[in-house]
Amino acid sequence: NAGVTQTPKFQVLKTGQSMTLQCAQDMNHEYMSWYRQDPGMGLRLIHYSVGAGITDQGEVPNGYNVSRSTTEDFPLRLLSAAPSQTSVYFCASSYSFTEFYNSPLHFGNGTRLTVT
Amino acid sequence: AQKITQTQPGMFVQEKEAVTLDCTYDTSDPSYGLFWYKQPSSGEMIFLIYQGSYDQQNATEGRYSLNFQKARKSANLVISASQLGDSAMYFCAMRPTGNQFYFGTGTSLTVIP
């Protein structure tokens, strides 16, 4: 039972480079989301999706792009990396609120990204 | 506006004692869920306990219990008989009607032997 699989675990980028963080879940969850975690700021929502073909912005979407072509996958793209995007990134999934309102978020193990 | 507040950046507790981690929330939705997560130093996010807004009784899961006071909009986590392995960051989260989860800034708990 893999749950939420997130890759890579670590990444170092130079300013201006682009990259994609991969996220896949095998629990048939409709809801998927990306958070960034910075010291003292908790988890802030970047983008989320409530199903294949549907995405929406969260609290801090600038500089990031997402797509949801399948139920299982929800990649996060950094278009042109900046030092301010140095952070730990988490992908998380859940059943939709209308399916199971008490469904918790299941998290991947995180990606530690450093932009120099 | 939806908001979660954790006012204790850091807490200390003696091993085998109980500790309460505070969480207050703000939502106008009549239906919502409250969640607590643990993040040890290894970094993973571990789901601990859930409380629904219509639940009549406080949730319990082993040594974890949730002190839910709906009128005060608080959902404090109580850890009984603290163990060294309880040292971690703890996050409170809320899911109002809809799909988004809202997180607090977390409380760092240190268990002292």
Image (cartoon, coloured by chain):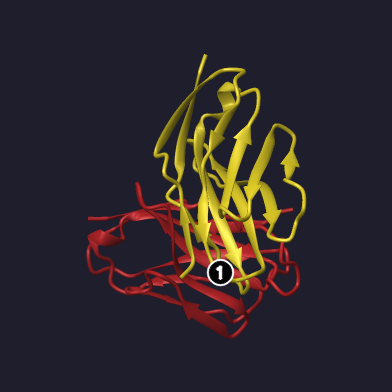
Chain colours: A red, B yellow
Which amino acid type is marked by label 1?
Gln
Q: Residue at x 45, y 40 (%)?
A: B107
On screen, residue A30 versus residue A32, left or right, reads right
Mark 1 secondary-structure assignment: loop
On screen, residue B61 versus residue A43, left or right, reads right
Along the line of sight, the residue nearer the viewer: B62 or A110? B62
Residue A63, quarter of the rendered image? bottom left
Q: Is residue A14 something one can see in this rendering?
A: no
Residue A30 drawn at (x, y percent): 67, 73
On screen, residue B61 versus residue A47, left or right, reads right
Q: Residue at x 52, y 37 (%)?
A: B40
Along the line of sight, the residue nearer the viewer: A6 or A94? A94
Residue B67, quarter of the rendered image? top right
On screen, residue A62 versus residue A22, left or right, reads left
Q: Chain of mark 1?
A: B
Circle 1 residue: B100
Residue B65 drawn at (x, y percent): 68, 39
Q: Is residue B15 something one can see in this rendering?
A: yes
Q: Residue at x 65, y 48 (%)?
A: B68
Q: How many marks?
A: 1
Residue B41 drawn at (x, y percent): 48, 35
Tell which residue pokes out farthest to the top in this image.
Answer: B113
Residue A98 drawn at (x, y percent): 72, 75
Q: Residues within 10 Å of mark 1 (few under 14, many from 20)?
A: many
Tell which residue pokes out farthest to the front in this image.
Answer: B71
Along the line of sight, the residue nearer the viewer: B113 or A85? B113
